[in-house]
Amino acid sequence: MARLALFMIFTVLCMNNLQAAIEVYQFDSPDQEERFHQLSDQLRCPMCLNSNLSGSDAPIAADLRAEIYEQIIDGRTNDEIIDFMTQRYGDFINYRPPLNRGTVLLWFGPLLLLLAGLLVVWRMVRSNQSADQALALTAEQQQKLEKILTGKK
Amino acid sequence: MNQRVKLFIPGVFFILMLGLLLFGLGRNPNQVPSALVDRPLPQFSLPELNQELVSVSSSDLQGSISIINFWATWCPPCHVEHPYLVEISESESDVRFIGVNYKDDLVEARLFLEEKGSPFEQVIIDLDGSLGIDFGVAGAPETFIVDSFGTIRYRHVGIINHQIWAETFEPIIARLK
């Protein structure tokens, strides 16, 4: 068990080294480096559909990472960099799409479905309750029932 | 009666969702809408492949309809597409074919066009892929239709052959003329 753990730690360390060896970027401050990782996690690779820039080996993803790096070093803000990418690749490139007419359903669709579901459940519970009331026996009927059950005539 | 109609609501909802999802399945996930359609060409001025002293700029592309094709010798689909482009460019006399040699080895690129013939009036060199980024290109080959005012009208991802040309490109070009 200890051996396995050791092996796993070793593997993870190796992977980190490997990743660092692919691209080496020098940042002026830790803040810049953090922004670089944040942006390349948030932006999507235009070629590979379901991975972000930091997780993709596609050449275009490497080019766009380099572009992000250069713009950060040039002192551009995150919004400016995201604008730059969106102008060229559309909302598609952003994993956090902006709220506009085309994306309203995307943002609020799940909430709408949840509300519809809650409404249905609420109405079902309510109609069950009223059905129970309709089925409830009147005082007279209750007396009759008790008589039958206790066997008195 | 009212109660009965209500029973159908989940079914109708289910069918609507099914329709929506089927519609989504039918769409090609690779067909990413281009942000550049109906926008002017990005500004650039880059050297030409066969005459490096000549530079081609975005304003040179105005005045006639152009086809801008991003290609490279390292890209296998570009090799497939090339003979079609040569044939199509010969039959289309009033459309300019401009190539963009995308992140390629220039010696190999020149050799490639010399051996297989060039469909292009001019070939722009994009060594580091920055023109590609300005065009929103994800890889090669990609082809753009640009009208005579320098506005991008269409983006095509993947190879062009006679069928794609006739079904997709010809109607757009005919409309722009």
Image (cartoon, coloured by chain):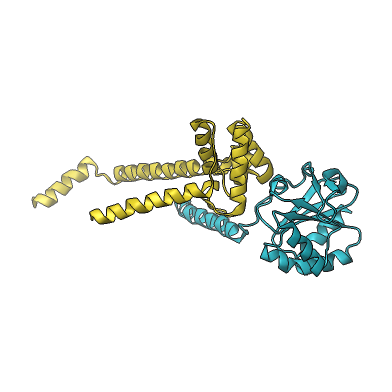
Chain colours: A yellow, B cyan
Visible residue check, residue B102: yes
Query: Compared to A136, does B163 lie above or below?
Result: below
Q: Is residue A124 left or right of residue B31?
A: left
x, y percent for residue B139: 66, 55
x, y percent for residue B109: 75, 61
Q: Residue at image x 83%, y 67%?
A: B117
x, y percent for residue B162: 78, 68
Q: Residue at image x 48%, y 55%?
A: B8
Q: Is residue A137 left or right of residue B67?
A: left
Visible residue check, residue B166: no
x, y percent for residue A39: 55, 39
Query: Compared to A30, does A22 lie above or below?
Result: below
Q: Nearer the viewer, residue A36 or A94?
A: A36
Q: Is residue A52 left or right of residue A10?
A: right
Quarter of the image containing the N terminus of chain A?
Answer: bottom left
Disc count in the image? 0
Q: Quadrant of residue B58?
A: top right
Q: Quadrant of residue B24?
A: bottom right
Q: Nearer the viewer, residue B25 or B133?
A: B133
